[in-house]
Amino acid sequence: MPDVVALAGGIGAARFLRGLVRAVDPTALTVVANTGDDLRLHGLHVSPDLDSITYTLGGGVDAERGWGRAGETLAVSTELRDRYGRPAWFTLGDRDLATHLVRSEVLAAGGTLSEATARIAAAWGLGFRLLPMTDAPVATRITTTDGRDLHFQQWWVGERAGPDVAGVRLEGAADARPAPGVLEAIAAADAVVLCPSNPVVSIGTILSVPGIQDALADRPVVGVSPIVGGAPVRGMADRLLPPDQLSAAGVARRYAGFLDGWVMDTRDADLADEVADLGVRVAVTDTIMTTPEIAEAVARAALGLVRPWS
């Protein structure tokens, strides 16, 4: 079975990965996740994208929300807020806290984020290898037009992406190194898949880690557009992308230096020639992945652009 590497953000990537693990042997799959959204809260290390992937593929996600744990309760967060006056803008559920406690315990004992991720993934029975993009601290920072410098989660969750964005800064990225196994997995991959994640603060953050984008140069790279009909399927890519990139073709241009294949939604079929003119092979299909079956069809369409896939 061919080896596949997926570069992934959070919720949108997790929904796509439900299909990718049906299209390929999960034991031949390595998922490299964005950690620029990580934060410390109440003394705990929280990794939102790693956890969204783990809960979704491990069968424990709240399917209605698309994030967090199913059957979640909020006793601890409520007590922290109401009795102790602790910040309440980022709510941690009681079940979710167990994951953060395990991760923080590993890190406090001198372990790495990779080691903590492997321990959590094993507990959830994930059949594929899940890696953080780096073990080093990297923080996505948002500069607002009113002159503030906010952690991405403070801007996105705490202020509901309200403030206009003047710029995005990746603190610590230049000094980071890929986590153990990341470059090796890419070098051995028969295909690298860019999940339909935010091009700026998910895929872009992963590619900012020195060595990762360079490693894609001689690999077959395919991606799934996170923009459908000129708008993001989820999230706030429209608040962060330059106007000329706010389309399925625009995001393909962003990746054109290393992109070989691009999957676009049927609503963007009129942009297929524009992408093809970049020298990128194109597949057009339904990319609104409301079911694992649709996600599988999208994954097969993506992989079929770089080689015959059984």
Image (spheres, rainbow, N blue to C red):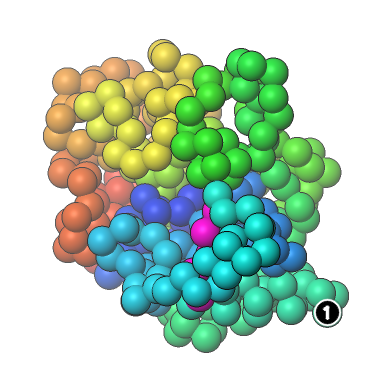
State the quadrant of the C terminus: bottom left
Question: How would you classify the magenta stretch by its main secondary structure?
Answer: loop
Element assignment for label 1: loop
Q: Amino acid at mark 1?
A: Ala
Q: Position of residue 86 (x, y in %)?
A: 66, 58
Q: Is residue 233 above or below residue 246?
A: below
Please give the range of residues in magenta: 90-94
Please say whether residue 270 is visible from this viewpoint: yes
Label 1 crowd (10 A; few <14 / some 14-19 / many >=20)? few
For residue 272, above or below residue 5: above
Magenta run includes residue 27: no
Question: Which of these two is toward me, 127 or 262?
Answer: 127
**Residue at (72% x, 47% y) in the render:** 138
220 left or right of 231 in image = right
Q: Which residue occupies 62% across, 66% down?
A: 83
Quarter location, residue 154? top right
Query: Residue 204, position in %: x, y?
Result: 56, 37
Q: Residue at x 35, y 73 (%)?
A: 70
Specify the quadrant of the image occupied by residue 106.
Answer: bottom right
Q: Residue at x 48, y 32 (%)?
A: 161
Would residue 186 be visible to someone looking at this image?
A: no
Horizontal and vertical percent for residue 75?
Answer: 50, 74
Q: Is the N terminus in the top left, top right, bottom left or bottom right quadrant? A: bottom left
Task: Provide residue 98's location: percent of width, then percent of height.
Answer: 57, 79
* Image vertical order of residue 143 relative to residue 88, above or below: above
Q: Is residue 38 above or below residue 231?
A: below
Q: Nearer the viewer, residue 146 or 196?
A: 146
Q: Is residue 91 magenta?
A: yes
Which residue appears farthest toward the front when viewing the image?
A: 83
Tag 1 residue: 109
